Every structure is written in structure tokens, then in C-alpha cells.
Image (cartoon, helix red, strand yellow):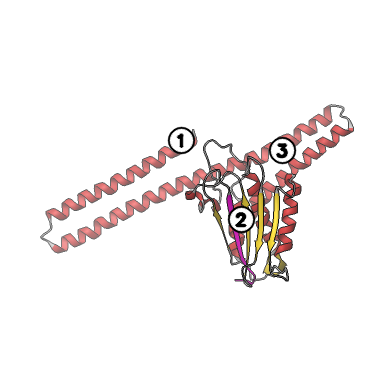
Amino acid sequence: MRISSRRKAIAFFLTFGVCLAALAVAVGSGWIILNWREGIKVFLGIIFFGAIITGLVLNTIFLVREIRRNEQHDSFINAVTHELKTPIASIRLYLETLQRREVDEARRREFYQLMLVDTERLMVTVEQVLKAGAIAQKKASSQRIPVDFNTVVRECVELARARHHLLPENLDYRESLPQSGSARMLGDPDELHTAVTNLLDNAVKYSLDGVHIAVELDAPDEELLVLRVRDRGVGIPQNELKRIFKRFYRVRQRGRPRVKGTGLGLFIVRSIARNHGGRVFAVSEGAGKGTTVTLELPRSVA
């Protein structure tokens, strides 16, 4: 209901701005036609009405952007609230069951395991929010240490397999490195772990019909490292490929169940890539055809 009303508000302000601009053009054109013989008045009139039209257009664009930004912010708040309330309610239910009923040892261990899973989900959500806030205020640091990016990726792949209960064939990792096998670079190990983990978690999250993810680390030259994460998931429409890296932004596709999340994962990846002098981008042939996200990082500090 709220989303529908905001869309109506966007349509109203857009139509209102267009109508005002059209009215200004009509009035200005009529005034110029009536006074075309007086050069100075015509010249000043063109400048004046041009300024009015420009102001109306910019004001309309600003209002529409603010409405969309508020809509994304509310969507983020709702998503975070859901991500926090669901595991808390689950943990509370298990604790109440253990408190009020006699439960055998096997069942008790099962409850403990489920509560640990819910706790991990809580930690991931909180860390995402805190990391996004810290990265948004943090400038690129010039203090980097030597890091073996190949080791970082391998650790993240193993962690993703354990966290999501995946087999090696579900999450395949390959490297195309020089004979030395070196993937050394200067960087922040914690940030690099966060970036790779977010890419893998995002690929798993949007693989709704079975997880088939290919991870490849390449070193095309002595200055660059390239990590590609390719999935066979829901895919991304062409007009959404750049927006997915914005904060709070989440792709919505009709006929697909809503994927859990906060809309911060890829924003964090982009921020970390920029802090290291690199970039990240996505390629997809469209909805239902999978996505390839590429992370490019220089070996030295940019």
C-alpha cells in the first residue's frame, strides 16, 4: 500500500513538473513572438524562461530521486527488521521449548545446532550493517600489507561451502595464475575477505533452482588480479546491472520469491574495490540466465 502511494506520488510530481515546464515554454514562446522586434527584451526573456524551465526540471528530478531514496531506505529498514526478528523469534522458541519440556539428548543437540545457525544469521546481518556504515565514512587507506589473494579466495570458498552446506561441484574454484602461482598484492586482508565472502554469498542467495557456482582467479598481467564469480541463478535485467551496486538497492523480479537480505552486500564489495584502486561490475544475459560478477584489483596500492 505504501509503495503504491509513493509510486503515485512520483507519477504526480513528474507529471506536474512536465506540465509546468510545458506551460513555461508556451508562455515564453508567446512572449517572444509578441516582442520579437525588441531584441534586448527577447534576449532577456529567453534567459529568464530558460532559467525557470531548468529550475523546474531540476526540482522535479530532485523530488523523484528523494522519493525513490526514501522508498529504498524503508525497504532496507523492513529487510533488516525481518532479518533480525526472524532468528530471534526462532531462538526464543527453542529456548522456551527446552525450558518447559523434557527433551532427549539428540533433540537437544539439534536445537543447539539450529540456534547456532540462527545466531550466525544474526551476526552476518549485524556485520553487514556495521561494515556498510564504516565503509561509507572511511577513506581509502594508504597503509596496505602484502596479501596472497589466492589464499584469501580459497579460505572464503571453504567457508561458503561449510556455511551453505555445499559440495565441491556446487561451488567450484579454479585459478589461472602464472607458473609461480603467485597472487600477491598489497591490501587489507579483512576487507578482501569481506568482499569475496559477499560475492559468494550473493551468488548462493540468488541461485534459487540449485547452486552451481564457478569461481575463477586470473592474473592477466603482472599488475592486475581478476576474480570472477559466475552463477546460474535468476540473472539480472540489463537496466539493473549498474544499480545493484548501490546501497539498499535490490533487484525485484516478477514471478520470483523475494530473496532475503539487506541490499548492502554488493555495495560493500564496490566500496572495498574502490578503496583498493580496483573496480567491480556484473554481466548477465537477462532474467533466468545467471550472472557473472567480476572483481578487478591492482597488485599495488593505487
Q: Residue reaching furthest left? A: 37
Tell whether position 91 is magenta: no
Amino acid type at mark 1: Ser
Residue visible at 61% across and 57% down?
A: 269
Amino acid type at mark 3: Ile
Measured from the top left, where is residue 144 in percent x and y?
68, 69
Mark in the foreground, 3 or 1: 1
Q: Callout 1: 10 Å neighbours few (<14), some, many (20+)?
A: few
Mark in the foreground, 3 or 2: 2
Q: Earlier in the sequence, mark 2 or mark 1?
A: 1
Question: Who is closer to the viewer here, 168 or 145?
Answer: 168
Residue labelled with disc 1 = 4
Vertically, is 115 above or below 197? above
Q: Secondary structure at mark 3?
A: helix
Tell whether position 298 is magenta: yes
In this picture, which residue range is highlighted in magenta? 291-302
Horizontal side of 4 relative to 101 (left or right) equals: left
Question: Who is closer to the viewer here, 64 or 167?
Answer: 167
Residue visible at 67% across and 41% down?
A: 84
Vertically, is 106 above or below 162? above
The answer to whether marks 3 and 2 mark residues whose Cβ atoms lie closer than 8 Å is: no
Q: Say if residue 102 shows up in the picture.
A: yes
Vertically, is 281 above or below 233? below
Badge number at residue 268: 2
The answer to whether marks 2 and 1 mark residues whose Cβ atoms lie closer than 8 Å is: no
Badge number at residue 88: 3
Give the CA separation, mark 3 to mark 2. 25 Å
Q: Earlier in the sequence, mark 3 or mark 1?
A: 1
